[in-house]
Image: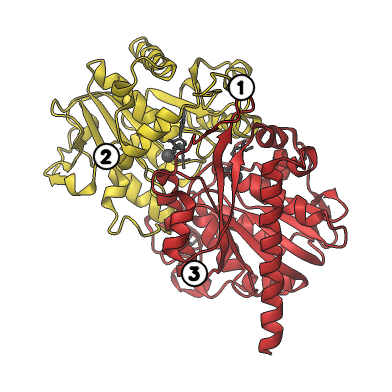
Chain colours: A red, B yellow
């Protein structure tokens, strides 16, 4: 049974929720008796199905931040590009930002549509070894808004994990929306029967952003999601004319560096502000190919290397443990 | 709450105008713009309130240096916190209601909807000229909850904030559809973070591109309210909870903000 059946009223709390069958909106719903009986609260069989499906995915990485607009999607996209530059690796990028999907544009796939295949939905390919899935591919026009409440978004995320024909993958990267909300709970829950390598946390240097990011870190700890490390993005801007650096988003409380030291987390790197990053995203190109010798591209490459090392160390640790 | 049942507007009865600050995109400066507009309007002699309904990332308290210890309850609900002695700027953040402000709020939609529903009508604003509502990014539970609970009262409309680049205007374009579908009038679009003038050599760099907000306004037939530059003095004022509009009255950023607040005020006068 889906989280929100088609015949449920608009405010359905979700058939697997604590309130199922009991909330005010359940009054008069045809499923109320079934939902109130508790039968629908049993562990979702999809979790096991997703576990099965994900058994052919070697590494799973979530990209998170409590704060909006810090560059989660930009980082996810460039991590995917960088990993896929090794043509022997199969890489996929999944966008679970249901209300504000940015990945289609950043990957240069605006206007693409998903195709139905025998074994499910087929993702859209940027390259032979780089697959992408986003709700953006299911919308018919750039004006379409997805005005969905939580339970319906959860259903979509479930479908992305279970019904997309991902094939054998070396890396699955998941770009998430800002905050700690339904999408985050769902992705963690649906992946609970598989092994997730960990999360990369993105922040900008100022306290306004860090105060939200600290909460996201607590969320990870609560749901036992390992943290691969933190990336500080938009960290200083070097004027192209006079070469002086400006702290446009000032690290008033010591930035990610201090936060990582306080919380004992690895700082993976600091990516500066560079107008060419924003432009590459708008044009759907990889900044790493556009300006490979820029300081920002070098930082990206170093961060990606550290993430790869983390993932392969984890495999080695697991092998030596058995 | 002991609100008079005969009065459908309850706590909003003496609130003249209600304006939502929205954006489909995260981090474009919704909370910053809300704060600066509120300051500008209150310095222009208006009584202003800010309602912050961002549960996962409430920013308003920090931006205006107010703490949750300042919040009290009275017969008609929560008493907002005033930032000034003349009581011209009142703040209420949903963050104040959380037990541990450092804890992540990991709630599913229905629970958020319930809390916001209550919250929206439970603040004892008293008399206000303008109530600004700062929202989280997206088009989801929180937004629908706010609108549903304000339906009884008149909402003047929404101000949409975007940054200039296509990644952002693309999301805001969808937000416009959200407004149309939910019957929210669009008061106008603000382009934020457009152009950075180097404080050392005065060279202007368009870090997040330029002009996207104005283009979007044209494309969708909406009013363009103006653009606010990317200004390190603004981000540091916001960080420290200082009043930018008082500290830097000669800056280009200030004149952009004050012109936007004037245009907005005029559009509220002429419905
Ligand atoms: N280091 C950088 N320099 C310049 N621009 C950048 C940088 N990083 C990201 N950007 C730009 O900033 C904007 C916001 O980035 P992005 O969309 O990746 O953030 P996000 O965290 O995914 O946002 P949301 O919370 O809305 O999902 C984009 O236009 C992106 O191109
Ligand atoms: N014009 C500007 N110049 C410099 N910094 C700015 C400007 N506008 C916003 N900022 C800074 O950018 C960051 C993000 O802004 P803000 O928190 O207001 O965005 P938001 O849209 O409310 O984000 P969220 O989607 O997370 O609620 C803040 O640190 C803020 O100080
Ligand atoms: S009874 Fe309640 S939980 Fe069950 S489907 Fe209906 S509205 Fe949803
Ligand atoms: Mg994003
Ligand atoms: Mg905000």
> Mark 2 = which residue?
B65
- Is residue A62 visible in the rendered structure shown here? yes
Q: Quadrant of the N terminus of chain A?
A: bottom right
| Along the viewing direction, whichever of B39 and B182 lies nearer the viewer | B39
Q: Residues within 10 Å of mark 2 (few under 14, many from 20)?
A: some
The residue sitting at 52% across, 52% down in the picture is A65
The reply to whether dot 2 and dot 1 touch (C-beta < 8 Å) is no
Answer left or right for A177 relative to B63: right
Which residue is farthest left? B75
Furthest residue in direction bottom, as rendered = A322
Residue A275: mark in rendering: none
Looking at the picture, does residue A50 appear above or below residue A321?
above
Q: Residue at x 74, y 53 (%)?
A: A80
Report x, y in % for residue B12. Answer: 24, 31
Q: Which residue is mark 1?
A: B210
Secondary structure found at label 2: loop
Which element carries disc 1, helix, strand or loop?
A: loop
Q: Are marks 2 and 3 on the same chain?
A: no
Q: Which residue is mark 3?
A: A223
Q: Is residue A100 left or right of residue B186?
A: right
- SS state under label 3: loop
The chain holding disc 1 is B
**Can residue A8 be seen here?**
no
Q: Are marks 1 and 3 in contact (CB under 8 Å)?
A: no
Place residue B196 in its image quadrant: top right
Gap between marks 1 and 3 measured at Cα: 41 Å
Using the image, determine if residue A125 lies above or below residue B243: below
């Amino acid at each position: 049974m889906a989280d929100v059946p088609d015949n449920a009223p608009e405010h359905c709390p979700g058939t697997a929720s604590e309130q199922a069958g009991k909330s005010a909106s359940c009054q008069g719903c045809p499923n109320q008796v079934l939902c109130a009986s508790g039968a629908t609260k049993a562990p979702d069989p999809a979790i096991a199905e997703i576990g099965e499906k994900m058994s052919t995915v070697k590494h799973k990485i979530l990209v998170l931040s409590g704060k909006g607009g810090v560059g989660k999607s930009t980082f996810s996209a460039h991590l995917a590009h960088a990993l896929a530059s090794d043509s022997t690796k199969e890489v996929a990028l999944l966008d679970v930002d249901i209300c504000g999907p940015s990945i289609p544009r950043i990957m240069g796939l605006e206007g693409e549509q998903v195709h139905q295949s025998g074994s499910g939905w087929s993702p859209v390919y940027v390259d032979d070894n780089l697959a992408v899935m986003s709700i953006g591919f299911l919308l018919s026009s750039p004006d379409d808004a997805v005005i969905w409440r939580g339970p319906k978004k959860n259903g979509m995320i479930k479908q992305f994990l279970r019904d997309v024909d991902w094939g054998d993958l070396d890396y699955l990267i998941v770009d998430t929306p800002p905050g700690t909300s339904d999408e985050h709970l769902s992705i963690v829950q649906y992946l609970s029967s598989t092994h997730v390598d960990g999360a990369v946390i993105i922040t900008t240097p100022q306290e306004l952003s860090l105060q939200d990011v600290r909460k996201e870190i607590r969320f990870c700890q609560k749901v036992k999601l390992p943290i691969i490390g933190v990336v500080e993005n938009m960290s200083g801007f070097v004027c192209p004319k006079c070469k002086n650096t400006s702290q446009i988003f000032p690290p008033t409380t010591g930035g990610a560096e201090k936060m990582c030291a306080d919380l004992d987390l690895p700082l993976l790197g600091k990516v500066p502000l560079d107008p060419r990053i924003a432009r590459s995203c708008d044009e759907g190109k990889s900044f790493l190919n556009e300006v490979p010798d820029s300081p920002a591209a070098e930082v990206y490459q170093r961060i990606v290397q550290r993430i790869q090392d983390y993932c392969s160390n984890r495999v080695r640790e697991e092998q030596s443990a058995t | 709450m002991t609100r008079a049942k005969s009065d459908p507007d309850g706590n909003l009865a003496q609130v003249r105008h209600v304006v939502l600050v929205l954006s489909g995109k995260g981090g474009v400066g919704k909370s910053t713009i809300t704060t600066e507009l509120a300051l500008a309007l209150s310095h222009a002699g208006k009584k202003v309130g800010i309602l912050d309904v961002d549960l996962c990332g409430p920013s308003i308290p920090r931006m205006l240096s107010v703490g949750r210890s300042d919040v009290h309850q009275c017969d008609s609900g929560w008493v907002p916190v005033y930032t000034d002695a003349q009581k011209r700027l009142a703040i209420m953040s949903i963050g104040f209601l959380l037990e541990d402000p450092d804890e992540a709020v990991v709630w599913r939609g229905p629970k958020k909807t319930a809390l916001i529903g209550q919250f929206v009508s439970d603040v004892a604003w008293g008399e206000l000229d303008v109530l600004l509502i700062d929202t989280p990014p997206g088009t989801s539970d929180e937004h629908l909850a706010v609108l549903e609970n304000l339906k009884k009262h008149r909402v003047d409309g929404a101000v949409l904030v975007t940054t200039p680049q296509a990644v952002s205007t693309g999301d805001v374009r969808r937000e416009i559809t959200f407004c149309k579908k939910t019957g929210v009038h669009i008061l106008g679009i603000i382009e934020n973070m457009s152009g950075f003038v180097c404080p050392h050599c005065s060279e202007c760099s368009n870090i997040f591109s330029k002009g996207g907000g104005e283009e979007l306004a044209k494309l969708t037939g909406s009013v363009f309210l103006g653009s606010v530059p990317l200004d390190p003095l603004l981000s540091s004022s916001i960080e420290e909870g200082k009043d930018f509009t008082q500290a830097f009255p000669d800056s280009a950023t200030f004149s952009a903000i004050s012109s936007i607040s004037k245009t907005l005020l005029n559009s509220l006068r002429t419905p």
